[in-house]
Structures are given as structure tokens and as C-alpha cells.
């Protein structure tokens, strides 16, 4: 109860500052990081398997929380450029850095804290240990502590600012949406949109994941929340367990690029590029639709190939008591963003609209005799609020720890010059080839995305690869969307892919079997980021005709490549036909009317040939090619 109360208080603090405005930078960010560290180790102490770790975690909870409080209490002194740090400041800095590294490892795995620790050693001791190009400048411990702790850089820098000022309210908003029943509405809505016809259960999983993912902002959270329902449903419809898990893993990853909310990385992108969040959401809309179209088409073709998952039953009824608040909240959010309000204020207003409409809809149902008595309804709604705010506070813990650790790493990359040195090396390798630079950036993003969330993968790659792409003439927004897209894909790319592990655990299937199907289902998705570069209409660059043309050509490319990976288009595709489909998709990758026309004619010819072959085979075989006998 005490832990839940602390989480609720943490969430309410951020709701209040979203409306009333933030406190002084170090005060606001100190509460954000210090509160998160205290809660993170409180969680650790509650689930500790040994008494020794329970006491260590409890001590780190107090130390981490004090590290943030120390910044709050000495805010004015730290902001004075003439300030000399005291021994207690060095001690607090050391405690917070160590606490952040350990908390990041406990919550997010080894990759990010190990990279950060290596960078920290390089920054502090690199000047004495090495020479030449990679030698960093000499720094004192006073400089290290000031840069990473006692200033608005490092731990309490712009990442913590975005976390506490923008991302926090959307994490809380998403938790409240789930608590008030949005998850059920998403499943009901997906059932109405995709439930009938061939492949219905798997298509429901795709649509549900798209809707849920834009609220959760986490591939793993999406898999755990949605997959526990959709994976068994797909299994009952006849899909292999590994395929069902692959569908959920690949679909769940894409929710982070689906407007209007997207993932935390999108808010960081808006700040890094200094452009409105709505501009990023609009530019990401077509690529997001293409992502889920790819998964949807793959599922449809697989279901046709194996004659699976037909569901002609009654469509589910959408519960208006839960659907109306969801519609009002999302409508308020989009409307305020379009009207020019800041993302923070828009998120806060949408949160209040959600709570007010959820309460009124429940009371209206109660008064109409469709629910409990008003008193019981109010008590139940109070429990919903408590759960929503507690979940929102817990959700902020991982975000704050991630941003604090990433803040250390990016600050070191900048202060030591390591980021620019890596970027220069990449430029030397790529030469003047944009395609080589894009491939290098994609590989780097997937490598850095191993065992870390999308946001960390995006930030780390953008710090070194975005300057490279910009130098080769790529518009900054396109470059960052390209990197963000591949940061999302790192969640389903072996050997380390968290959403696949989560889906495999739910399905009780081998990891590599699920990974193979996830790559098979989402294979064409890896082409879409490159299409953003070579077909700029996908990111809304150009007039309406250019946008529609680029979207249509990309859709045809997706269909061709999905058919090649699944082995079915208008009929079963053999090895030669699959190679022809891959070649067709590759031609769409090269922009130009001649290539597009050739690829479209090739695709049409394959469809016509398969239809003719199926008709010839039908009288002899009794069924269309590709169906079950």
C-alpha cells in the first residue's frame, strides 16, 4: 500500500506540473530522477531473493532518492557558475551515477549500463591511457562531477527535461487509458475491423497491437498485455504456436511509431530537431500504416496458403461506457495538438478529459440502470484511478532510469568528442554513398538496440549517425525517422530481441522458432525505412499527387516482398516465382517511372499467371492451389 501511494504521488506531481508549469530545472529533474531511483530500488527490495540484497536495495533506494533531493536542495548553488563543489557534492554525484548504472542493469539489461560505464572510464582516464586521434581531453574530477551531476547537463540534462516535462504525462495518460478499459475497447474494435474472414484471429492481433502500442509505447509491454489473449486465440484457430507468437512480436514492436501518441523516442526527436511533435506524428503516419499493412498482408497470405483462421461469427459489441471516454480523450489530445498547444499541456488536458468523461459515463450507466448503484460506481471509479496513477508512476520509473543513464552517455559522447569521432569514421567508410551510410546506420541502430529499449537505441544511434546522414544531404526529419524505425526493428531482430523473447515465453515455444516467423512476417518492413529516403512522399514531402504515388508504389513493393517471404500471392509460389517476386520488390526500391512501370507489370503478370494456373488445376485437384484438401 505504501509503495502504491508513493507511485501515485510521483504520478500526481507530474500531472500537476504539466498544468501549472515545471519548477526550476534542477528541482523538477531532481525529483524526476531521484524519485525514480528511490522507487526502482524499492521495487528491487520488494522482490529480492535474499536478505542481503534486500538491505542493499533498501540502502540504494534511500541513497538514490537523496541524490536527487541533494540537487533540489542545492539548486541555486549548482546554477551559479562561480560555485565550487564540496566533498558532499562529489559523494552525491558518485552515489547517483553508481545507482543509475545498477538500476539500469536491473530494469533494462546489461547493454546500456556497460556502454555507459566504458564511456565513463574513457572520459575520466582516457587522456592518460591513450594518445592520438581517440585521446579525449584531460578533465578533472570537478569537471566530471559538474558535467554529469551538478548542472543541467548529463543526468539532469535535456533528456531528463523531456522525460519529466513531456514523456511523463503521456506515460500516465496511457496507464489511465488502460485502467479505464481502453484495452478492452481496442480488442473489441479490432474484432469488428478484422474479425471476419480468413485469418481473422491473427488480423485481430495485428490491429489490437497497433492500437495498444500507440498507448503503451513499449514493445514488450504490448506483447505481455495483448499477447496473453491473442496468442492462445490464434493457436485455437489453427495457427502454429511459433507463428502466432511471431505475429504478436512483430506487430507489437510497431506500435511505437503509430500516431497520435507514438513512443517516447518521438518526443525526444521533436526536441532534438526543435520541430513540433505534430509534424513528426504526421510524417510518421504513412510509414506506420505501411508497417502494419506489411504484417496484415503477411498474415492474410499465410492464412490463404494454409486455409486458416476463418471466422464468420458475430462481431463483438463495443462497450460505450469505456469507448466514449477513450474517443473523447484521444479527440481532445489530437484537437489540442492541432490547435497549437504544447504536447505537455495537450497531454494533461487529455488526461483530465479522460477522467471526467470516464466518471460521467459510468454514472450515466448507473443512473440508467445498466451498472452498479451510484455509490458503488464512485468507489469502483476511485479504485480505477488509484490503479491508473499507481501504474503510471511505476511506468515512469523505467523511463527516468533509462533517460538518466542515457543522459550520462550522450553527455560524455559530446564532452569527450567521441561522438563526432565515430561519426567521422563512419563518413570515411561511407564516402559519398548515401546507400552505404544508410546501411551502416541501420546496422549500428540494431547493434545498439540489443537489450535496450527503442528510445535508448534511437538516441545512441542518432548521436553518431544523424550527422553522417545530414552531411550526405538527407533532410534531418527523414534521417531521424529512418533511425527511429530501425530502433523499433531492433526489438524483433535476432539475436537479442526482447519482444520475441516475451512472445516465445507466452506461447511456450522455442525462441529461434518464433524469431524465424517474426522475421518472415516482418521481412518487408526492413525495406520501408529505405523507402522513406528514396520516396520522400512517404514523409509528406511533395504535393498530394507525389505522396499518393509514393505510397502506392511502396504498397505494391510490400505486397511483392510479403508474397516472396510467405510463398503465396494469388496462388502457391514456388522458388522461381518467389525469386521473381523479390526482384519485383527490388525494382520498386529504385525510384523512377520506368522502374515502377516495369515492376508493376511484373507483379501483374505473376498474379495473372497464378490465377490461370489455379484455374487449370481446379478441375483436376478439386480445390484451388494453396488450400487444404
Image: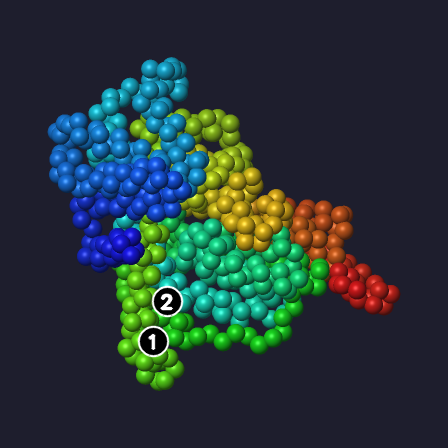
- Residue depicted at x 31% and y 66%: 383
**Between 183 and 276, the one nearer to me in the picture:** 183
Q: x, y percentage for residue 46?
A: 35, 47
Please say if 238 is above or below 106: below
**Between 198 and 230, the one nearer to me in the picture:** 230
- Residue depicted at x 29% and y 73%: 378
| Residue 478 seen in this snapshot | no
- Residue depicted at x 48% and y 26%: 428
| Residue 107 seen in this snapshot | yes
Q: Residue 180 carries which label?
A: 2
Numbered label tally:
2
Crowd band around label 1 with a 10 angstrom C-alpha radius: few (<14), some (14–19), many (20+): many
- Tag 2 near tag 1, CB within 8 Å: no
**Between 398 and 576, the one nearer to me in the picture:** 398
Horizontal side of residue 248 vs 476, given as left or right:
right
For the rendered model, the colour scheme is rainbow
Residue position for label 1:
362
Secondary structure beneath dot 2 equals loop
Q: x, y percentage for residue 188?
A: 49, 70
Q: x, y percentage for residue 144?
A: 26, 27
Crowd band around label 2 with a 10 angstrom C-alpha radius: few (<14), some (14–19), many (20+): many
Amino acid at each position: 500500500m505504501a509503495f502504491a501511494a508513493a507511485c501515485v504521488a510521483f504520478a500526481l506531481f507530474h500531472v500537476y506540473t504539466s498544468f501549472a508549469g515545471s519548477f526550476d530545472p534542477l528541482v523538477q529533474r531532481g525529483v524526476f530522477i531521484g524519485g525514480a531511483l528511490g522507487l526502482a530500488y524499492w521495487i528491487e527490495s520488494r522482490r529480492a531473493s535474499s536478505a542481503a540484497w534486500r538491505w542493499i536495495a533498501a540502502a540504494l533506494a534511500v541513497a538514490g532518492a537523496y541524490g536527487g533531493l541533494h540537487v533540489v536542495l542545492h539548486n541555486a548553488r549548482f546554477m551559479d557558475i562561480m560555485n565550487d563543489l564540496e566533498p558532499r557534492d562529489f559523494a552525491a554525484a558518485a552515489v547517483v551515477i553508481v545507482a543509475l548504472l545498477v538500476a539500469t542493469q536491473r530494469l533494462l539489461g546489461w547493454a546500456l549500463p556497460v556502454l555507459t560505464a566504458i564511456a565513463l572510464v574513457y572520459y575520466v582516464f582516457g587522456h592518460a591511457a591513450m594518445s592520438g586521434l581517440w585521446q579525449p581531453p584531460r578533465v578533472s574530477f570537478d569537471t566530471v562531477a559538474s558535467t554529469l551531476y551538478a548542472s543541467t547537463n548529463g543526468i539532469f540534462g535535456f533528456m531528463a527535461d523531456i522525460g519529466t516535462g513531456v514523456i511523463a504525462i503521456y506515460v500516465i495518460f496511457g496507464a489511465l487509458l488502460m485502467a479505464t478499459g481502453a484495452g478492452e475497447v481496442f480488442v473489441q474494435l479490432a474484432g469488428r475491423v478484422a474479425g471476419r474472414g480468413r485469418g481473422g484471429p491473427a488480423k485481430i492481433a495485428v490491429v489490437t497491437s497497433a492500437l495498444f502500442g500507440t498507448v503503451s509505447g513499449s514493445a514488450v509491454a504490448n506483447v505481455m498485455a495483448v499477447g496473453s489473449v491473442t496468442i492462445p486465440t490464434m493457436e485455437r484457430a489453427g495457427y502454429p504456436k511459433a507463428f502466432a507468437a511471431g505475429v504478436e512480436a512483430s506487430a507489437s514492436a510497431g506500435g511505437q511509431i503509430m500516431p497520435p501518441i507514438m513512443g517516447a523516442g518521438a518526443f525526444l526527436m521533436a526536441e532534438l530537431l526543435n520541430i513540433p511533435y505534430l509534424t513528426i506524428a504526421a510524417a510518421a503516419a504513412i510509414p506506420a500504416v505501411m508497417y502494419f499493412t506489411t504484417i496484415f498482408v503477411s498474415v492474410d497470405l499465410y492464412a490463404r496458403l494454409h486455409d486458416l483462421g476463418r471466422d464468420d461469427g458475430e462481431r463483438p459489441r463495443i462497450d460505450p461506457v469505456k469507448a466514449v471516454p477513450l474517443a473523447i480523450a484521444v479527440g481532445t489530445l489530437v484537437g489540442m495538438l492541432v490547435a497549437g498547444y504544447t504536447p505537455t499541456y495537450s497531454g494533461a488536458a487529455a488526461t483530465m478529459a479522460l477522467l471526467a468523461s470516464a466518471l460521467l459515463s459510468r454514472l450515466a450507466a448507473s443512473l440508467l440502470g445498466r451498472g452498479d448503484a451510484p455509490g458503488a460506481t464512485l468507489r469502483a471509479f476511485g479504485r480505477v484511478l488509484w490503479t491508473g496513477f499507481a501504474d503510471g508512476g511505476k511506468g515512469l520509473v523505467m523511463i527516468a532510469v533509462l533517460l538518466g543513464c542515457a543522459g550520462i552517455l550522450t553527455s560524455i559522447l559530446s564532452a569527450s568528442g567521441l561522438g563526432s569521432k565515430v561519426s567521422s569514421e563512419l563518413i570515411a567508410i561511407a564516402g559519398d554513398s548515401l546507400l552505404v551510410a544508410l546501411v551502416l546506420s541501420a546496422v549500428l541502430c540494431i547493434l545498439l538496440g540489443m537489450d535496450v529499449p527503442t528510445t535508448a537505441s534511437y538516441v545512441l544511434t542518432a548521436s553518431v549517425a544523424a550527422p553522417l546522414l545530414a552531411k550526405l544531404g538527407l533532410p534531418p526529419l527523414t534521417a531521424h525517422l529512418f533511425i527511429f524505425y530501425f530502433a523499433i526493428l531492433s526489438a524483433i531482430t535476432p539475436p537479442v530481441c526482447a519482444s520475441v523473447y516475451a512472445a516465445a515465453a507466452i506461447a511456450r515455444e522455442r525462441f529461434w522458432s518464433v524469431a524465424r516467423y517474426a522475421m518472415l512476417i516482418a521481412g518487408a518492413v526492413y525495406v520501408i525505412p529505405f523507402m522513406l529516403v528514396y520516396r520522400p512522399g512517404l514523409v509528406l514531402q511533395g504535393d498530394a499527387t507525389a505522396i499518393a504515388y509514393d505510397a502506392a508504389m511502396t504498397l505494391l513493393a510490400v505486397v511483392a516482398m510479403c508474397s516472396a517471404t510467405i510463398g503465396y500471392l494469388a496462388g502457391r509460389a514456388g522458388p522461381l516465382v518467389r525469386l521473381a517476386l523479390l526482384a519485383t520488390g527490388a525494382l520498386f526500391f529504385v525510384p523512377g517511372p520506368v522502374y515502377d512501370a516495369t515492376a508493376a507489370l511484373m507483379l501483374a503478370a505473376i498474379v495473372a499467371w497464378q490465377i490461370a494456373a489455379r484455374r487449370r488445376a481446379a478441375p483436376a485437384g478439386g480445390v484451388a492451389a494453396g488450400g487444404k484438401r
